[in-house]
Amino acid sequence: MATKEKGAAKGGAKGGAKAGAAKGGGAKGGAPAKGGGKKGGAATTRAAVDFTKRDHAGAGLPVAAPRLKAHYEQTVRASLAKQFGFTNPMQIPTLEKIVINCGVGEAVKQPKLLDVVVEELALITGQKPVRRKAKKSVANFGLREGQDIGASVTMRGARMWEFLDRFVTVACPRIRDFRGLGTKSFDGRGNYTLGIKEQMIFPEINYDMVEQIHGMDITFVTSAEKDAHAFALLHQLGMPFRGDDKPVTPKVAQPSAA
């Protein structure tokens, strides 16, 4: 009888050890799967977030008028009319819109990369960008007609003036080795276009969240008919042009030392 009880206990211990080994093996076997999922997640592109739908600290407060627009109406208009001899107030040039265009060639192979670019443009401009599609297929690039290949934003009104103010006072000084903007990028119809090599110059972009550096094209569309008028308008609005081709601005005569 004692021998049977001893054998039963021994068999139960072995069975328990096997069950424990199987349980441990299952947990151990599950660990690599968990680690593999984590490793695979780190290699993929992060999910994009629509920042235009988030609440901010100024929600519900009255919107302040753009200070650059007030400067244009109070100072720049009178200065331009005096400089070029405009007799009709409608002849004085003004800023109509600002267009930001960003092409993403890598979106052909990595569609999620375009989502991140759209997210960053929304964060910079404060409005949702429009996705641009390819107009024709290019076999060498693996591009098909109708495929998303870029994004663009068109700003008017208060957003336009606020963006120009932030671009001139904050973003331009953050450009590496900045010595002024070029003066030969006018198209002959009063519009000025410049290229930005990296989106890091805008303070809205978090450096730790950037996955890939990309540039963008910014076009300032004015109502001027000549480049000289648009040149003077942008210069008096604060655009930091370089070289000696700046428009001549009146200077206050300093009294001579006695």
Image (tube, rainbow, N blue to C red):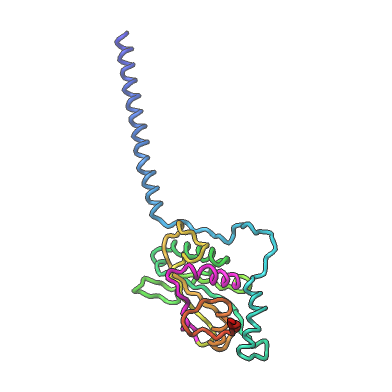
Q: Residue furthest front?
A: 258
* Residue 95 image offset from top left, x and y in percent: 59, 79
Task: Give above or below for 212 relative to 180.
Answer: above
* Residue 195 image offset from top left, x and y in percent: 46, 75
Residue 70 in which image quadrant:
bottom right
State the residue at coordinates (62%, 85%).
Answer: 80
State the residue at coordinates (31%, 8%).
Answer: 2
Residue 23 falls inside the magenta stretch: no
Q: Nearer the viewer, residue 91 or 27?
A: 91
State the residue at coordinates (46%, 80%).
Answer: 182
| Quadrant assignment for the N terminus | top left
Q: Which residue range is magenta in the image? A: 160-187
State the residue at coordinates (61%, 81%).
Answer: 94
Q: Is residue 111 left or right of residue 70?
A: left
Q: Is residue 2 left or right of residue 47?
A: left
| Quadrant assignment for the C terminus | bottom right
Q: Residue furthest right?
A: 62
Residue 163 falls inside the magenta stretch: yes
Q: Nearer the viewer, residue 79 or 97?
A: 79
Task: Give above or below for 170 relative to 222.
Answer: above
* Residue 151 image offset from top left, x and y in percent: 49, 70
